[in-house]
Image: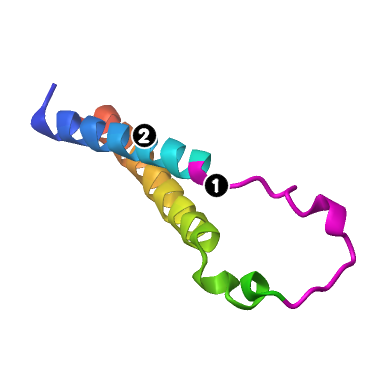
Amino acid sequence: MDAIQMTLGIVLLVFSVAIVLVVLLQEGHQHNAGEAGVAKETFYTRNKSRSLEVFLERWTKFIAVGFFLLVIALNAVLFFL
């Protein structure tokens, strides 16, 4: 194995562990299932953009995109070298 392949493999492993951890830290979307149609003005709804849940959702998207790009790069390196 080349150094490039080894490095990309290690980074891929880090990304895969990171995405698993970030997804496991998120809450399910059905925790408000009993409140359908109820529009409450709470502190949480007003400050939702600054909550931990939104932070984890954003990082899930970034890590997932990075993971897929890394997988494509690793396959390209293995195929062409």
Amino acid of disc 2 = Val
The span from disc 2 to disc 1 (Cα, nearest Å) is 15 Å
Q: Name the dominant secondary structure of the magenta segment.
A: loop
What is the residue that sits farthest to the left in this orientation? 3
Q: Which residue is mark 1?
A: 26
Badge 2 crowding class, 10 Å Cα cut-off, few under 14, some 14 to 19, many 20 or more, is few
> Quick check: is 29 in the magenta stretch?
yes
Disc 1 secondary structure class: loop
Left-right relation of 21 to 80 = right
Q: Is residue 40 above or below residue 77?
A: below
Q: Which residue is mark 2?
A: 17
What segment carries the magenta color? Answer: 25-41
Where residue 31 sits: x, y (%)?
73, 49
What is the residue that sits farthest to the right in this orientation? 37
Q: Is residue 69 above or below residue 41?
A: above
Disc 2 secondary structure class: helix
